[in-house]
Structure formats: C-alpha cells, structure tokens
Amino acid sequence: MSGRQAATALLGLGLFLLAPALDAQTPTVGSKNFTESVILGEIAQGLARQAGVEVSHRRQLGGTRILWRALLDGEIDVYPEYSGTLLQELLQIPDADEDAVRKALAMRGLRMTASLGFNDTYAIGMREEKASTLGIRTIGDLRNHPRLRLGLSNEFMQRADGWPGLRQAYALPQTANGLDHDLAYRGLASDALDATDLYSTDAEIPYYGLRVLVDDRRYFPVYEAIYLYRDDLVRRAPTWVAALEGMAGRLDAATMQALNGRVKIDKEQEADVAASWIGIAAEHSPDRWQRIAQRTREHLALVVVSLGLALLVALPLGILAARRPRLGQVVLAVAGLLQTLPSLAVFVFMIPLLGIGARPAIAALFLYSLLPIVRNTHAGILGIPAELRETAAAIGLPHSTRLWRIELPLASRSILAGIKTAAVINVGTATLGALIGAGGYGQPILAGIRLDDLALILEGAVPAALLALVVQGLFEGLERILMPRGLRLRARE
C-alpha cells in the first residue's frame, strides 16, 4: 500500500468512527466542568424526558466562555448559568435591571428563566482551625496575613468579578496560584493551601469544616441560578421550555448543597440524583466496559481523522522542504512554532472557528501532528545518498517515478517513525478534547478529578496508555511490512 493510499484509508476509517458524533440534531443541554452545573444539566435533561422531548447532555464543557460561545453559535440550546456571571462577565452590564438583561439577551437570540431559587455566590474559605488561630473572620482580615498561601480556581483567577477585582477592592497583599476548583479543597485539607475561592452551595464546605469569610465590602454580586436558552427553542421544544421556566423558585440553597453532597460525598451518579429529585425513574447507565468501548470509539475517531488529515498535508510539505531548501526552512520553522503552542490554548482557540465537539479537537490535533511527519519526511529524503538520486536522474526517470519508487521507499523508515511519533502524541493530547465536548478518554479523567474518584481517572488513563502502546506496536509492524527488503536486511546487520 502506498503512503497516499494509507492516509486515505486512515481518513475513511476515522470518518466512519466519527459519523455518530457528527449527528447532533436533537436539542442539547450543556454544563460546565463542576458538579453543580452537571447536576443542573441533568435536571434539565430529566425535565425534557418527563415532557416527552429527546435531549442530549454535553457534560463538563470547561468554563463559562466555552458554554456561552456554544450557546450563541447553536452548538447547545440550554445551559445553567448564574446571574452575577451573566451581568458582570458575559453581558458586562453589572447594574442593569431584569428588563435590560432580557433585552440584551433577546438581541443575541437568547432567553433566560427566572431564578431557580438559590444564590450560589462566590466566597473565600479557610479551614476553621486555621482561621480561628489567626483570628480571620472577614475577607478584609486577610490583609494582615500577607504570607497566606492562596490557591484559586483557574476561572476565578481571570474573571472580571474574580481575583483581580477582589484583590484591588480589599488591597490584598497575597499572590495566588491557579488550580482546578476541586483540587483546591484537597489542598486545604492537606494544609498545602490556606485559602481558596468557594461556591456557597459547595458540599465540601461542611464536609471539610471550612469557615466562609464574610464579604465585608460586599464585593461579590448575587449569583442566582438560572437557565439560559436559545429563543428558537420555544418553537422547537415548547414543552421543555415550559418545564425549564417552571423551575423558578423550586431549588433553595440547602437543597442544592444536599444534591451536591450526594454526588461529591456519597458518590452517587449525577443523573440518578437529578432523576430522584425530579421524581422520575433513572435511565439505565452503561456499565464500565460499555463506557470504555464508547470512549475508545470517540478517542480513535479523534486520533485517526487528525492523523489522516496530517498525512495528506505533512507528507507533501516534507517532500517540498527537502527539494526546496530555503522554503524548507520556513516550513519547518512554522511547523515547529505550532508545536510550541500550549495544547489547551489551541483547543479553545478553535472553538470560534469550528464550534465545540470533535471538529476543533481534530483541528488542534492535526496541527500537532504536522511537525514530526514533516521533519522526518524531510530528514529521510535528505538522508538518501546523493549518488542514488544522481543515478536515478541520469537514467532519465521522471520526478514522480523517482519519488514513489526510490525516494519514499528509501525514506520510509524515517517517515514511519515520524507518523508513529505523531500518533502517540495525539493519543495523549486527545484527552484534552473532553474539555470542549469531544469525548474520548479525557471524559472519565475529568470526571474523576472533579469527583475525587481514582477509579474514574484510571478508567480513562489506563486505556489511553494501552492505546498508545498498541499504536506504537502497530506502526512498528507497518515499518517491517512497508520497508524495502534491502533496508530490513541492512537494519539487521
């Protein structure tokens, strides 16, 4: 099989694997990457089921901006949000009344429900024992203890209503490090941190015995829980919209904290907790092996399609770089620059262009696949002895014949090594695709980190490691099959 045929076959297989993921005609609810948002997303899905509407749920899609962009672009139809975030961070009209907010949403083709009944405001918390020892009761008291170690959630570190504004409002002298919200609680419990940001309905507050510091300057706005949804959903699923609007005032803070506790502390499934609160039967959840099979299919789709596309682009670029040295330096420099970009940033950067889901993940993985293939194709062709290339030219072989019959076969060992490197890198990097709704092995890893569940983390990490080993072994086998017999004999000497 030629390199061109192999790339086409890989691409065709990937598109077959990806086909179910590309079919997203049903209304979709999204949720952020923290437990309360996932529970509220499950409640929205359960209400749809109760109303006879088929709805999918794209869980833990990262932060606020990802969900907001997905809603505006029609990638999702509903997601749970908070009034303070909507006014301060998204619409940037902090003092607007409800009519002005609804009008601003309508201009974007969106609507919102009334408050679900609870205010999940931001807060700053410390271990009770530590706060008592230091005499810290309010956020303002933190000014007297500049050496305190603050670990704040990554989103809070960047938000307009988060750390930058809080630090300025209270003239706090501390510096803060960003980390995952759920990991911060474990940092407090292990005394690796002294203070972190909280959501006031977090189940961990009573579980870890934390003191919620008084916001004595009333910096944090009200964060009433709401659902944001697309205006056209009223026409497409009116019974579901009516059910969402009917959620107004039904959830108080104590109830929401208890639901969070059932998931975070008691280790119940979010879907089961939501179904029991609504009063409907929980849907059958797939067992572990079914979940692994589904995630394997999703992960393979990401890797196969991105690698197939990279082969179609990188092989010609590598050949061009070898034949045109000056242009080749530019090609290699650009491919090297792409490789240095932070992977998560590239994934998120693709969202405005391609939406959420598999497409932006494939685009990001495609970019990361280019350098190993381009570089090894370039090196492999340049490594062919000059006398062989000169002999082929002297006997009058056309350029295409020289390429397919001489240069590519002789460079095949180097080229396959580059493809193998790209494939193994993609297997690992594809786990980040779960943050933008691409699925794969990253989904259980993210859920396991969020729920402090080692078994869930291993459910994604172990298959990902095994897949990387399988891919490496597959390409080593291909190398033995495709490499010319003379080169195999030379390699054994």
Image (cartoon, rainbow, N blue to C red):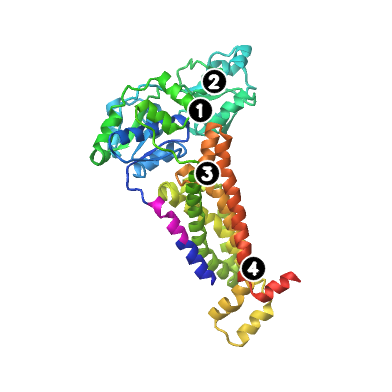
User: Which image quadrant for residue 461?
Assistant: top right
Question: In this orientation, does residue 376 appear?
Answer: no
- Please report contact status of discs 4 and 1: CB closer than 8 Å, yes or no: no
Q: Which mark is residue 442?
A: 3
Q: CA distance from mark 1 to mark 2?
A: 10 Å
Residue 173 pos. (x, y %): 59, 23
Amino acid found under the numbered disc labelled 1: Lys
Q: Which mark is residue 207?
A: 2
Q: Which residues are magenta?
A: 13-22
Q: Which residue is mark 1?
A: 264
Instruction: Tell me if label 1 and label 2 are in contact, CB under 8 Å.
Output: yes
Sequence-first disc among 1 and 2:
2
Comparing marks 4 and 3, which lies closer to the viewer?
A: 4
Give the SS element for disc 4.
Answer: helix
> Which residue is drawn at the image coordinates 61% and 75% (left, top)?
407
Query: Could one spot residue 394 in this view of the protein?
Result: yes
Left or right of 123? Residue 246 is left
Q: CA distance from mark 4 to mark 3?
A: 32 Å
**Residue farthest right in this picture:** 493
> What whole-number distance in Å separates the C-alpha atoms at marks 4 and 1?
50 Å
Q: Earlier in the sequence, mark 4 or mark 2?
A: 2
Q: Main secondary structure of the magenta part?
A: helix
Tag 2: amino acid: Tyr
Residue 172 coordinates in the image, percent (x, y): 56, 22
